[in-house]
Image: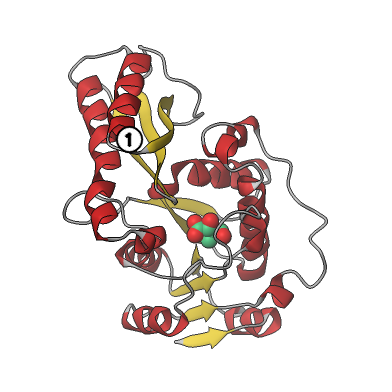
Amino acid sequence: MEIIADIASLRARLKYETSVAFVPTMGNLHAGHVSLIRIAQQHARCTVVSIFVNRLQFAPHEDFDRYPRTRSNDCRLLEESSVDVVFMPDEQTLYPVSQEFQLLLPVMAETLEGVYRPGFFRGVATVVLKLLNIVQPHVAVFGEKDYQQLQIVRRMADQLNLPVQIIAGETIRAGDGLALSSRNHYLDAIQRQEAVELARHLRQIRDSIASGERDFPLLEQLAIEKLSQRGWMVDYIAVRQQDTLLPASADDSRLAILGAARLGQIRLIDNFLLMLQ
Ligand code: PAF
């Protein structure tokens, strides 16, 4: 495995590769990332993983400074996972000058996470576009855990004619159902026990819809009330169309049930997808 920090060396290393699959990350890697790497490896001869904590996607009050940076553990895991190349640029490499050009995002970026993290998707899309331009992969893999991010990246690749296939990796969950996330490390023991409730309530909504319930606002409201009673600060619980992320109506058959809520200072997001016959 090669660890490369600068763009010229990365391009030289990849120049003669016939197929490249790419997994962008912010590090603090866990089994969820490994599952994305496994998918990447099925699609190309050479797998590149990037580790870069992207300042542009954090608001000033968010956790950029304390975001866990676990470089040596990450490299060990990547080596064990038979990754070919790790791209680990510093800020000066990715943003040598202030990033004046940024993307104008679709309306889809203004809902859900976009309401609570304004600017987040612009920062994500900008860095993802830069990374795709630098690595020039044939395939890039993104987790379904960040479902809205995945849909925005898909649209970006599509509408900007990027020569890359975007592939989704299923959310990987702990034994109790909590979606794996780097931010789970912030949870103390009591919060960790409680954290699974977000997934449990989203799954309950999915199961109710699968059994025929179609009053989506009622299901959303009930989950918000129950989570709030348990001490959560709920940002949203929403039943949406999978492809547009617009509010779903009773005759939609491809649904995403998404939620974001805070336990103390820690904000968790999760989702379940449902395909009706
Ligand atoms: O999902 C993430 O880890 C980040 O948003 C990404 C895609 C690596 C961009 O910084």
Query: Which percent across, then down, holds residue 5?
Result: 62, 83
Query: Which percent across, then down, holds residue 103?
Result: 73, 47
Q: Which residue is mark 1?
A: 273
Q: Is residue 148 left or right of residue 101?
A: left
Q: Is residue 106 visible?
A: yes
Amino acid type assigned to the residue bearing label 1 in the image: Leu
Q: Residue at x 41, y 78 (%)?
A: 74
| Count of numbered circles in the view | 1
- On screen, 52 above or below 60? below
Query: In the rendered image, which quarter is residue 62 located in?
Result: bottom right
- On screen, 251 above or below 99? above
Quarter of the image where the N terminus is located: bottom left
Q: Is residue 102 left or right of residue 245?
A: right
Quarter of the image where the C terminus is located: top left
Query: Which percent across, then down, holds residue 6?
Result: 67, 82
Q: Residue at x 61, y 53 (%)?
A: 61
The way the protein has been coloured in the rendering is secondary structure
